[in-house]
Amino acid sequence: MESLARISSLLESARELTLDAAQATRSSRNSRPLDRTQIKKLLDSRNERDVLDDAQVRALALKTMSGIRVPVISQIVSLAIKKGVADMSPYVRRAAALAIPKCYRLDPSQEPQLVDYLTTLLGDKQYYVAGAAVISFMEMCPERIDLIHKNYRSLVKKIVDMDEWGQLATLRMAAYYARKCFPRRTRKAGLAEKSGQAADLQGFYDDTGVETNSSEVILDPDLQLLLNSIKPLLQSRNSGVVVAVVRCYAELGTREYVKLAIGPLVALLRGASDIQQVALYNVVSICLRWPEDFVKYANHFLVRDSDSTAVWELKLEILTLIFPHSNAHIKSLILHELEHFSRGSSNPLLVRESVRAIGRCAQADSSMATRCLRLLLGQIASLDGRLAAESLTVIRHLIQQDPEGHVGTVVRLAKNLDSATDPQARATIIWLVGEFAGLRGEDNIAADVLRILLKDFATESEAAKQQIVLLAAKVYLHHINRINEKKELDEGSGEKITELDPPVSPDEDNNQLAKLWEYALLLVRYDVSYDLRDRARMYRALLAVPQLATLMLLAPKPAPQAPILAGGGGIHGLKGYTPLPDWVKAGHEPDPTLRNNGLPTESYGESKGVVPASQRLDNMASKGSSVSPTIKNGDAVGSKTLDDWLAEDEGQEEESSEEEEELDDDDEEEEEEEDSEEGEDEDEEESGEEDYEEESGGENDRLVKS
């Protein structure tokens, strides 16, 4: 009795919860919500017709049942889904589609029959149901592309009418399906097929010149159907749908399709900060491939004070990507923007990234490198130590790209050692002086800079002291190498030393370089930093073997490339991003006839665009012909003169008279033939009657005899 009482109490509680859920759940705007008393009446009714007549009640019951997370009732839920799949109402079928993944989570062993239900719902004619079926498909079995083959075209055509969630799921499904079923095929197109502008751009961006043949992507007709069907979604109010369409165009389509999506993508920058961040990630991803398409939108990527850190980082990256492809006005605008934020911003992170962006602009466009370097050199004397240090780091990157052309820049930097106070800035300048200490031989300023720095060695920071010791080692190593080279030259020339020749000994300047090295070691010996003392001992051991020291200290260093800001580049920097699979290889794709559904399809390269009427008229005019003739009553009507019309009328009259004469002759012949045939028929009838009379008379005689 206690168990029955407990069950009855649970049922009462479930009834009350159902009443509350049904009252809270709103139906569509065009239909009236059910009253609480009506729902209670339906629950208390024992007549199934009262409950089953309302489609919304059936859908709500299926939704409520599938939401109960009790694995024991999974078979009951599966049975309810089966009935819902065959229901006449699209609301119930949609509820059944959304209940499939819930039932699968309750009991994965129900997968085979749930897949059958899902296959039926994917082919539903109602877009309201098909969108929900795709959502369940992507959640339950996104890799089962065999379920999509026969429904692919219908789903693509319904995507415009689906709700926003269905559109997002269908776009993800279509992108995965396209990579698995449509191989990426190209064909070589001659230069004559390309426009003049495309040829000029190819010659401008390629170092090897314009090629005679270039590849052109051939789109599968079914893939082209997808790309054309999702064009209206670029006008969607949902930013997620717009971004999904852009990703489809970027990952599946050609550059022509991507150009259509750039405007709607840039328009998302008017939204909230999180929407801007996602949109900018996609802009960076596309801009890495086709930066020139974003040049005209440069004003949209200027940094605002209200931008978050992630947003302005991406904007700076986009500005540096489009910089080499912009005209002089846009380049000047970008540099002024970066200079403003590098000097006047209170955000130290923005200052640092602005200076780095100037360096990337200088690396990307050699024609503007001088101006960028001038901007950076002007910031060395800044009171902001971080700005000066970051500017020197970028200058170092630029000098390493062309050491011979920046000897004067190194001298100018060495003069700024007296005014530079930031430890990192001083260390950078000292490193640059030591890195180029071998240029111009003995005329280099490295020895004089070392002499000046050793005077105040004790007051320098540890970072500057490390670079001073390294500078001393490099200067002394260059001195040793010059002496060794001079000895090799003397031995190779075969000159003999006579008594009149002075003895070979280091000159006064060389003795000073050796003394500077010994003095630097003496200063380091009594320094408090054990790291600095260890470095000095290592340098002394290396200089004992000049060849090894040359390999270690004077090895050529590659010019560093400034990394991009966007966390790995474009969309791949977003958390949770799942890349699409690679394109299927040609010959390994599924049979295209699986998508036919009894309809003929075009093959690769046979799809023809719609030719406008104006273009057809121009083509006809260029060929020297008039407008295409129209067919009326079997005669071609074109541009004719009055004489032609009269001559044609006379010819028609003669033809009609001849036809009448021929018809008269034919009628006479037919009448004669009919008369002859009638005579023959009469003779046959008479002979038949005589035969019949003879047969009947013979039968009568036999009857009489019997």
Image (cartoon, rainbow, N blue to C red):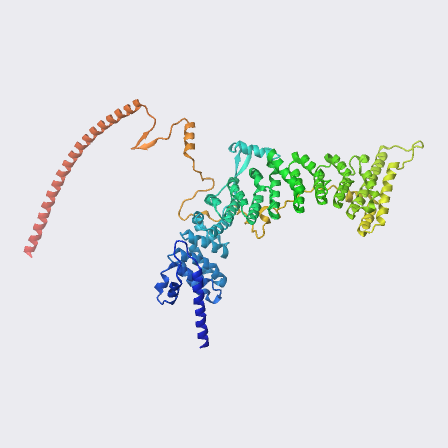
Q: Quadrant of residue 285?
A: top right
Residue at far top of view: 643
Residue at far left of view: 704
Number of marks drawn: 0
Query: Could you tell me which quadrant the N terminus lies in?
Result: bottom left
Q: x and y percent of residue 389 in the render?
A: 72, 43
Q: x and y percent of residue 184 in the render?
A: 52, 44
In the image, is 208 to the left or to the right of 77? right
Residue at far bottom of view: 1
Q: x and y percent of residue 576 in the render?
A: 57, 53
Residue 211 in sight: no
Query: Could you tell me which quadrant the C terminus lies in?
Result: bottom left
In the image, is 632 to the left or to the right of 253? left
Which of the two residues, 394 or 510, is positioned nearer the viewer here? 394
- Name above or below for residue 160 compared with residue 32: above
Which of the two residues, 670 or 526, is positioned nearer the viewer here? 526
In the image, is 705 to the left or to the right of 266? left
Q: x and y percent of residue 350 in the render?
A: 65, 45
Residue 242 in sight: yes
Residue at far right of view: 499
Which of the two residues, 541 or 450, is positioned nearer the viewer here? 450
